[in-house]
Image (cartoon, rainbow, N blue to C red):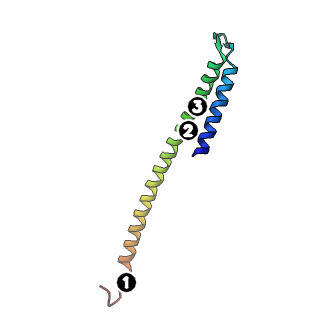
Amino acid sequence: MQVKFIIVVIFLLLGGWFLAQNSQMVEIKFFLWGPGEISLLVLVVFSLLSGVVLSLFISLVDQVKLRRAIKQQKKEIKELKEKADLSEHISQERSPRRHGDT
């Protein structure tokens, strides 16, 4: 646990150092629209957060698909177990009983 914490702290420090060195203003243009000049620090943070949100959304969609598949498979397993139990019950009823069995 401490190793993960140390790694996270190192990456945060490196990221902060990177952002502090890149705080100059840059011009942004997207086709013909653009907010003009913006701090590179704000642009990098916005880009990072946009990537995180997009990744979370994509993983959420995948999780929903997997949960649906698991639910369907559990339903199929339940149906197959019921069929197996019914089949076993029927085969026990059809099997001839020996003379001493009750």
Q: Nearer the viewer, mark 3 or mark 2?
A: 3
Residue 65 percent coordinates (x, y): 51, 43
Hey, what amino acid is under mark 2?
Answer: Ser
Mark 2 element type? helix
Residue type at numbered disc 1: Pro
Asked if labels 3 and 1 touch by Cβ distance under 8 angstroms, the answer is no
**Residue 16 occupies quadrant:** top right
The vertical placement of 70 against 95, above or below, is: above
Tell me if 58 is positioned left or right of 39 in this view. left
Looking at the picture, which amino acid does disc 3 mark? Val
Vertical placement of residue 38 versus 97, above or below: above
- Residue 59 is marked as 2
Residue that numbered label 3 is attached to: 52
Question: Relative to residue 69, is residue 58 depicted above or below?
Answer: above
Q: Which residue is mark 1?
A: 96
Q: Earlier in the sequence, mark 1 or mark 3?
A: 3
What whole-number distance in Å separates the C-alpha atoms at marks 1 and 2? Answer: 57 Å
User: Mark 3–mark 2 contact, CB under 8 Å?
Assistant: no
